[in-house]
């Protein structure tokens, strides 16, 4: 029997995937994630939200050896195989070596590989450490170690494993599992008026602090730790507070939940629909920030629709649906 979906989590995934698309379109327009304040404001919480939601849904009190293998095999089919299929597909289109993902990494398709590794680490710790308090302690220590590893501004380990990103986002996955374990307390905290105000104020204080010249270490901490935490939990607080409204049946809610449920498919397909602005580079540089963001939003909506339509076409085959799109 399938568990009842938590609507506001699908809504969070909808928001996150639309931001991902918007940022990738902006990049094609020549705007990098850290170039302008608006991009930093959007970029900070987007990936932590995905990992938090994944951790929230992954939480278990215990796991058996059989349960471990069942979960990992499903995650491998759901996350790894589709990413490799599309990565190889992109290389075919670019007339590149089909095995270069092993030495050069997954590039744009890094997210599902890192998420799979995060699940693997979490389930291994659950399998090995039976005492829940000790297990939580180990997870928190690893999360803090991940924060420390951000000081090493370089990649390490084999490219395909993308271990630096694992250390960057594992902490949000762990926080998601703890939020599910202590769900009543977590939701009470997210609804607390003082907490809501503090998160929003700190979010914008850190954001504006990044416009000032500071030491590289402080700037790195503010951008990759403080801003991510305050932005992520400010957004989570908003969705928790409006969970009942999102749960109500309406056309807009149904659309939001549908996009959220198909966020992985949109992520896998959207690279094939991103615009190429090479010939328009001079024209783009003359546009103001508002116009560029408006253009990006139009492309984001168009690409989302195209991805959803194309996924319907591909889903006609159950094998393509499962092994290329990661859908049941």
Image (cartoon, rainbow, N blue to C red):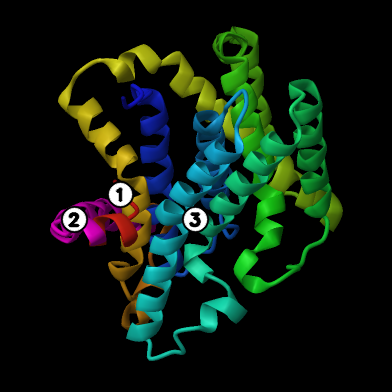
C-alpha span from label 2 to label 3 = 20 Å
**Marking on residue 10:** none
Q: Is residue 187 left or right of residue 138?
A: left
Label 2 secondary element: loop
User: Residue shown at 32%/62% (left/top)?
Assistant: 324
Q: Is residue 282 left or right of residue 55?
A: left
Q: Most extreme residue toward the front, as rendered?
A: 66
Quarter where residue 62 is shown: top right
Q: Which residues are magenta?
A: 291-319
Residue 244 falls within the magenta-colored stretch? no
Indicate which disc, 2 or 3, sits on the residue closer to the N terminus: 3
Indicate which disc, 3 or 1, sits on the residue closer to the N terminus: 3
Few, some or many residues within 10 Å of mark 3 (<14, 14–19, 20+): many
Q: Is residue 29 visible?
A: no
Which residue in the protein does label 2 denote? 315
Tell me the mark number nearer the camera, choosing from 3 and 1. 1
């Amino acid at each position: 029997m399938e568990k009842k979906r938590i609507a506001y989590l699908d809504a969070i995934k909808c928001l996150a995937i639309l931001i991902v698309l918007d940022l990738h379109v902006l990049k094609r327009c020549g705007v990098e994630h850290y170039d302008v304040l608006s991009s930093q404001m959007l970029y900070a919480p987007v990936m932590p939200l995905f990992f938090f939601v994944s951790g929230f849904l992954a939480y278990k009190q215990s796991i058996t050896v059989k349960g471990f293998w069942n979960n990992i095999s499903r995650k491998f089919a759901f996350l790894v195989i589709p990413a490799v299929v599309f990565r190889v597909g992109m290389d075919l289109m670019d007339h590149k070596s089909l095995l270069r993902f092993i030495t050069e990494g997954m590039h744009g398709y890094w997210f599902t590989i890192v998420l799979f590794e995060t699940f693997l680490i979490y389930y291994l710790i659950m399998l090995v450490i039976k005492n829940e308090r000790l297990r939580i302690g180990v997870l928190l220590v690893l999360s803090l170690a991940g924060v420390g590893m951000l000081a090493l501004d370089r990649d390490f380990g084999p490219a395909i494993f993308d271990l630096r990103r694992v250390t960057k986002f594992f902490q949000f996955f762990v926080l998601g599992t703890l939020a599910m374990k202590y769900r009543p307390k977590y939701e009470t905290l997210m609804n607390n008026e003082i907490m809501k105000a503090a998160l929003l104020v700190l979010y914008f204080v850190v954001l504006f602090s990044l416009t000032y010249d500071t030491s590289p270490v402080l700037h790195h901490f503010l951008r990759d730790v403080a801003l991510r935490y305050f932005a992520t939990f400010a957004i989570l607080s908003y969705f928790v507070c409006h969970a009942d409204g999102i749960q109500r049946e309406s056309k807009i809610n149904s659309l939001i939940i549908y996009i959220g449920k198909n966020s992985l498919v949109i992520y896998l397909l959207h690279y094939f629909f991103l615009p190429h602005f090479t010939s328009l580079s001079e024209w783009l540089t003359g546009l103001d920030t508002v116009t560029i963001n408006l253009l990006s939003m139009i492309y984001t909506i168009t690409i989302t629709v195209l991805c959803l339509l194309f996924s319907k076409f591909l889903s006609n085959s159950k094998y393509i649906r499962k092994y290329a799109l990661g859908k049941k």
